[in-house]
Image (cartoon, rainbow, N blue to C red):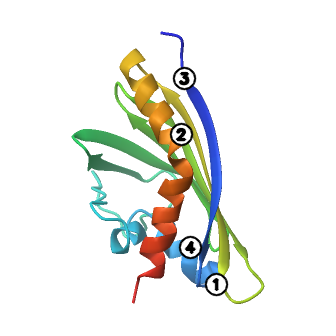
Amino acid sequence: MTGARHHLSGGLHVALPPADAFALFTPRGEVVWAPGWEPRFPVPTDDDAAPGIVFETEARGARTSWIVLHRDPGRSISYARVTPGSRAGTVRVELRPDGAGGSDVTVTYELTALSEPAEAELDRFAAGFADYLRSWETAIAALP
């Protein structure tokens, strides 16, 4: 295995102020705009964005475990994530006022492939990262 590691960062715009937009990037908040996003919590929690909270998601037949690492409501939230045999790393979402009542959002992924077959998959994800974030922006903009 030669190893694949990617630092991916990009932006999107949300037409809500950071204090309101923040909720869209919490585990339960993503449910309203991300098709197929269904976080499962092994321990019941009222505060899904509290540091240390663990949840799992499943997509395309792969289960990913997540841990909330940090949150600063209205400003940022970060996660550790591991998809066994595929990839591991962190995700950070930072929000800033755009000066017109909305938010400029920066999303940063630091991901490492965990197997040789996962290297090509991670490379494809990296190549499509800008389109991936555009799909977030489009889905959020379509919210009622």
Residue most extreme to the left: 61
Q: Earlier in the sequence, mark 2 or mark 1?
A: 1
| Residue 114, above or below 11 | above
The residue nearer to you, when weighing 19 against 127, is 127
The number of numbered discs placed on residues in the rendered structure image is 4
Mark 2 vs mark 3: give the one in front.
2
Q: Which element is circle 3 on? A: loop
Residue most extreme to the top: 1
Q: Amino acid at mark 1?
A: Pro
Q: Which residue is mark 4?
A: 22
Q: Earlier in the sequence, mark 3 or mark 4?
A: 3
- What's the distance in space between the residues labelled 3 and 4, CA to CA? 31 Å
- What's the distance in space between the residues labelled 1 and 3, CA to CA? 36 Å
What residue is shown at x 59% (from left), y 84% (from top)? 15
Q: Earlier in the sequence, mark 1 or mark 3?
A: 3
Q: Quadrant of the C terminus?
A: bottom left
Q: Which element is circle 2 on? A: helix
Q: Which element is circle 1 on? A: loop
| Residue 4, above or below 14 | above
Q: Amino acid at mark 3?
A: Ala
Q: Amino acid at mark 4?
A: Phe
Mark 2 vs mark 4: give the one in front.
2
What residue is shown at x 50% (from left), y 32% (from top)? 123
Q: Amino acid at mark 2?
A: Ala
Which of the numbered marks, if any, corresponds to residue 126?
2
- What's the distance in space between the residues labelled 1 and 4, CA to CA? 8 Å
- What's the distance in space between the residues labelled 2 and 3, CA to CA? 11 Å
Where residue 79 appears, as percent x and y from the top left, is: 52, 49
Mark 3 vs mark 4: give the one in front.
3
Q: Which residue is mark 1?
A: 17
Decide: few, some or many residues near mark 2? Use Cα within 10 Å; few <14, some 14-19, many ≥20.
some
Q: Which residue is mark 3?
A: 4
